[in-house]
Image (tube, grey):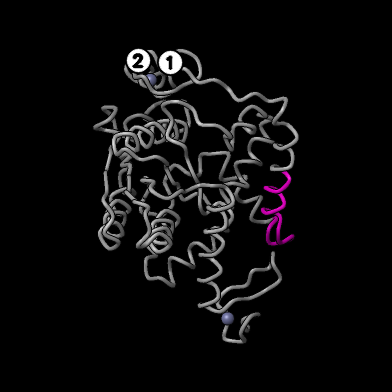
Amino acid sequence: MLCSLCRERAIVSQRYLGRQLCQDHFVQDFEERMAKTIVVNGMIEKGERIAVAVSGGKDSTALLFALARAFAGRDVELVAVTVDEGIAGYRDDTILAAERIARQLKVEQMIVSFREEYGYDLDEMVVGKRVAPCTYCGVFRKNALNCAAKRLGASKLATGHNQDDEAQSVMMNYLKGDMERLMRFRPRREQPGLVPRIKPLRDIPEKEIALYAMVNGVYFESRECPYAQLSLRADVRDMMNRMESLFPGTRQRTLQGFERIEDLCKEGWAQMELAECGECGEPCVGERCKACELLGRLRG
Ligand SMILES: [Zn+2]
Ligand SMILES: [Zn+2]
């Protein structure tokens, strides 16, 4: 297999583009695609301080690495935020990996834990509960990241979501018929109290992000979260992977289709107004934020 651009030995086949790339062209293409996503969507401007959510997994590690490289010597500051959910036998290794990459790139890092922020580890939260672990984890992680980004004085919060995650999220909302959430998927306007989130890797497939981390020597083999199998996302992921291998480009087309629908709907779909949570002051829909609601249930 030879590179479609230079005839060197190829290390990746991009079937959805009908080409193969050698290591040099792959890395160059990867960084150009991320830069294009950032520029076209106005994700990062000069003078900004960007909080990067770094879990220690391959996506967020690759994101921090690629951003550090893209903005080296430029007027953009990066700071890493790592959330320790408290998942025994899974999180400790990834936290070490997150600390290692932040140190290697000389990026300031803040670690926040569920235990310190909310009084419980995720493991404790889900014992004997009927709610799926991912519900607790998702709500508290979002809350912790937003609070940490504010404490750090960051103007944006960057996450390592990849094209697979994005296509899965869109598909899950279709499958649940949740059009409200689908339309909220890519917010168009800033909301007070909420640090705007950006996803610089959202146009790049998961496999290529892993490869990018590998060729740059920052790949960390992490186990899958022990709770992952309990979610709808796991089934949707399997389905989308099968469709992608049968029909290359499925993910890209799913997202393009969604963007088209979103465009057509933006007039009729007013973005929700957020209020301040009566208990913690974080932005929320209604009177009490999801984190406070779940904490109330845990204490009750
Ligand atoms: Zn090449
Ligand atoms: Zn609250």
Of residues 219 and 157, the one nearer the viewer is 157
Of residues 47 and 103, the one nearer the viewer is 47
Residue bounds of the magenta highlight? 243-257
Which residue in the protein does label 1 denote?
288
Quadrant in which ligand 2 is drawn? top left
Task: Give the spatial CA distance, label 2 vs label 1.
Answer: 7 Å
Q: Secondary structure at mark 1?
A: loop
| Residue 200 visible in the current orientation | yes
Locate residue 102, reporting x and y percent. 29, 56
Amino acid found under the numbered disc labelled 2 = Glu
- Whether pointer 2 and pointer 1 mark residues with C-beta atoms closer than 8 Å, the reply is yes
Amino acid found under the numbered disc labelled 1 = Arg
Locate residue 154, reporting x and y percent. 35, 40
Q: Is residue 221 left or right of residue 189?
A: left
Where residue 115 sits, quadrant-wise, is top left
Locate residue 159, reporting x and y percent. 45, 47
Residue found 26% across the figure and 44% down from its top: 110
Which residue in the protein does label 2 denote?
279
Give the prevailing secondary structure in the magenta stretch. Answer: helix
Where the C terminus falls, by quadrant? top left
Residue found 45% across the figure and 35% down from its top: 138
* Label whose residue precedes the other's in the sequence (2 or 1): 2
